[in-house]
Image: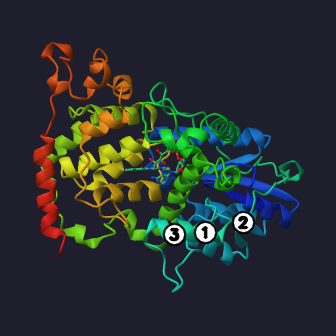
């Protein structure tokens, strides 16, 4: 009897623990991916297109033996298991709220048919939920989590020996083709799939890792790894990357490890507090007065379109629409602007990000937003309000990043691009005036915070 390997957020063949488990259990393995509308709907076209590209690559590497079905997994998998006589379905853990509930349904439906449900590994070096404080409770603060995470450790990447796996033919099993991409032109997405992920990673380690900690905050320089979309779909396992980051004396490697630890921390927080995807982790913020009327809606539209009149904010929002990606420093700046200059709910911004980001990941996104809003686990203190102008001058000192995305300002030299209101009006006639007065809104944000901080 074949084993079924159900691919989800693990679209690769190297270092794949669930694949190893399936191959050990059975002589032949049926590779399956289920297109689930509940997951596809909230993802925008760029994340879907990237997923489809990854599926196409995986299918090719499997000699066109990836079975793709469309539907509700709790119906598709038991039906398939019955049809091919599989005794087990193998997966990597999905610890997100929807994934956990869905897996519970699938497990139950398989149990009724006497099919084993085997979970091996997860998209993380340490599976969420494993690390606790001495008293058994989860961490709420990053630094001690990171220490415990490092001490916990993880196995070295496992050679999966995929060449020896016999992949079952999906013929006659009602597969559907990988959907066509939805974007003709539009966002410039990273090249999809495992081969590209590993190539990108090796190039980064060779050329950019050494300077990563000096350059990671500069949106004008291509100094970060751009690995996030690959990690999102499991085209590479973080263990594979951590193996290349084990030199303790290397500043770039230490700094990169720290960022991967953030990814693991947020997944752990989400696993322990699934409600943190939707609600303030710090419940004092439930009483924060927010703007939600028609004027707020209009400001939100201006923010989404990148027409706030603050160049670094607008460059970031346009980069998001153009590439399905935004530099981390700029994500922090635009998020702070939405919350503290426009006084809008963080989840409006989070939803827009999830719709457009090719790396959109519930744990990293919702907690990145809560960090900026001051309502998260160990969030930025609310009273520290980013000034979008000085942030721009500091992290995009020559103004190159702004000029790349804000065409109306292309003719303005140097760092003057960050203060367009000081230019002679004729220099950038099409660029909007600032929608708010930052120093006024800063005071307003602090006053609102004053009303909740001791409650
Ligand atoms: P690098 O600097 O090369 O970092 C390497 C890897 O470390 C990243 O690929 C990512 O997996 C991880 N990482 C880095 N910074 C963070 C962080 N702050 N939190 C969690 N993981 C991190 N990241 C996502 O993957 N998906 C999201 O939906 C997402 N939404 C965000 C929303 C906001 C408001 C903020 C402030 C941050 C968000 N991040 C998100 C984190 C971060 O911005 C991206 O991971 C990073 O910009 C991806 O680019 P990179 O791969 O070149 O990063």
Q: Are marks 2 and 1 in contact (CB under 8 Å)?
A: yes
Q: Circle 3 sits on which residue?
A: 145
Residue at 81% across, 48% down: 169
**Which quadrant would the N terminus be assigned to in this image?**
bottom right
Mark 3, residues whose alpha carbon is within 10 Å: few (<14), some, or many (≥20)? many
Q: Hey, which quadrant is residue 65 in on the image?
A: top right
Would residue 128 be seen by someone viewing this image from the given angle?
Answer: no
Is 154 rendered above or below residue 62?
Answer: below
Is 424 rendered above or below residue 141?
Answer: above
Q: Circle 1 sits on which residue?
A: 106
Residue at 27% across, 17% down: 412
Q: Nearer the viewer, residue 93 or 272?
A: 272
Residue at 16% across, 53% down: 292
| Label 3: which secondary element | helix
Query: Which numbered disc flags the more N-terminal residue, 1 or 3?
Result: 1
Q: Are marks 1 and 3 in contact (CB under 8 Å)?
A: no
């Amino acid at each position: 009897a074949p084993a079924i390997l159900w691919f989800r957020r693990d679209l690769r063949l190297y270092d794949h623990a669930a694949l190893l488990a399936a191959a050990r259990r059975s002589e032949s393995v049926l590779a399956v991916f289920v297109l689930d509308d509940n997951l596809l709907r909230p993802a925008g076209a760029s994340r879907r297109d990237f997923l489809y590209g990854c599926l196409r690559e995986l299918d090719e590497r499997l000699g066109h033996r990836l079975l793709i079905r469309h539907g509700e997994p709790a119906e598709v998998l038991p039906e398939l298991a019955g049809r091919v006589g599989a005794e087990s379905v193998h997966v990597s853990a999905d610890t997100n709220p929807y994934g956990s509930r869905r897996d519970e349904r699938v497990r139950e439906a398989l149990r009724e048919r006497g099919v084993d449900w085997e979970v091996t590994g997860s998209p993380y070096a340490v599976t969420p939920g494993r690390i606790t404080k001495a008293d058994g409770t989860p961490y709420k603060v990053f630094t001690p989590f990171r220490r415990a995470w490092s001490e916990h450790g993880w196995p070295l990447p496992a050679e999966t020996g995929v060449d020896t796996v016999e992949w079952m033919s999906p013929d006659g099993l009602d597969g559907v083709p990988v959907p066509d991409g939805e974007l003709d032109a539009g966002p410039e997405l990273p090249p999809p799939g495992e081969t590209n992920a590993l190539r990108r990673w090796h190039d980064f380690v060779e050329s950019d890792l050494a300077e990563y900690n000096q350059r990671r905050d500069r949106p004008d320089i291509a100094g970060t790894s751009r690995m996030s979309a690959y990690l999102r779909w499991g085209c590479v396992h973080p263990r594979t990357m951590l193996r290349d980051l084990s030199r303790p004396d290397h500043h770039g490697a230490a700094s990169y490890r720290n960022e991967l630890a953030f990814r693991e921390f947020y997944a752990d927080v989400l696993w322990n507090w699934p409600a943190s995807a939707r609600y303030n982790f710090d419940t004092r913020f439930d009483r924060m007065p927010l703007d939600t009327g028609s004027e707020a809606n209009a400001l939100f539209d201006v923010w989404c379109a990148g027409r706030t009149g603050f160049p670094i904010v607008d460059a970031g929002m346009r980069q998001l629409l153009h590439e399905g990606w935004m530099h981390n420093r700029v994500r922090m700046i635009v998020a702070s602007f939405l919350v503290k200059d426009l006084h809008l709910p963080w989840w409006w911004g989070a939803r827009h990000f999830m719709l457009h980001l090719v790396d959109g990941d519930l744990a990293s996104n919702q907690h990145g937003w809560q960090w900026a809003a001051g309502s998260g686990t160990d969030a930025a203190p609310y009273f520290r309000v980013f000034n979008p102008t000085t942030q721009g001058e500091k992290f995009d000192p020559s103004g190159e990043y702004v000029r790349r995305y804000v065409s109306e300002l292309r003719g303005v030299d140097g760092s003057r691009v960050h203060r367009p209101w000081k230019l002679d009006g004729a220099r950038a006639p099409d660029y909007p005036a600032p929608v708010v007065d930052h120093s006024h809104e800063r005071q307003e944000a602090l006053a609102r915070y004053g009303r909740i901080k001791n409650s």
